[in-house]
Image: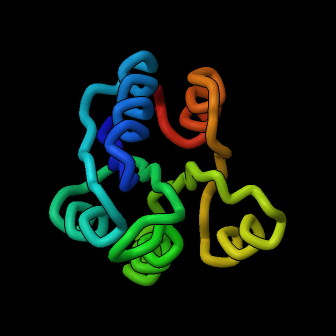
Amino acid sequence: MKVLVADDSGVMRKIIIRSLNACGVSEIVEAADGSEGWKAFQQEPVDIVLTDWNMPEMSGLDFLKEIRGSGSDVPVIMITTEAEKGKVIEAIQAGVTDYLCKPFEQEELRDKLEKYVAV
């Protein structure tokens, strides 16, 4: 399984990657923002995308819209501090698959992954 992780915080990417590794995931593509994530998404197939919402260049929401606009139905999990109901609804309307609020526990990430891909 290959996972694309887009987050502008290098520390948060490391936390997510460490959690993914603990779930047995070793094929991980990193992106520092949505724009980098979109380029990576177009270049190599991935099984699932984990993206932050608030990033420079291209937000996670815009990244999600690009993915859905391309016709892809790859699962996209938004991992973000944006927990207000309006934001969650906006992400759902844009086609997000699931939502995980920061900070999160490794088990929460595993549970989300298991819903959509074989871990």
Of residues 59 and 21, the one nearer the viewer is 59
Q: Please tell me whether residue 80 is drawn above or below residue 95 in the rendered image.
A: above
The percent coordinates of residue 15 (x first, y second) are 42, 30
Image coordinates for residue 48, horizontal then vertical, percent:
42, 49
92 in relation to 69, above or below? above
Res 17 → quadrant: top left
Please count the marks in the image. 0
Tell me the quarter of the image containing the N terminus. top left
Q: Is residue 72 left or right of residue 112?
A: left
Tell which residue pokes out farthest to the left in this image.
Answer: 43
In this rendering, position of residue 96 left or right of residue 88: left
User: Compared with residue 50, is residue 62 higher up or lower down, i.e. above or below?
Assistant: below
Kindly give the residue lying farthest to the right in the view shown. 85
Q: Residue at x 29, y 56 (%)?
A: 32
Closer-to-camera residue (72/3): 3
Image position, residue 119 (x, y; %): 46, 26
Classify 78 as above or below 88.
Answer: above
Q: Relative to residue 39, is residue 77 drawn left or right?
A: right
Q: Which residue is drawn at the image coordinates 73% and 69% (left, top)?
A: 87
Of all residues, the one furthest to the bottom in this rendering is 69
Left or right of 80 on screen, residue 26: left
- Looking at the rendering, which quadrant does residue 14 occupy? top left
Q: What residue is drawn where x is 53% and y is 63%?
A: 53
Q: Who's the residue at 38% across and 23% down the image?
A: 18
From the top left corner, tell me how far across and down residue 11 is, in percent.
37, 37
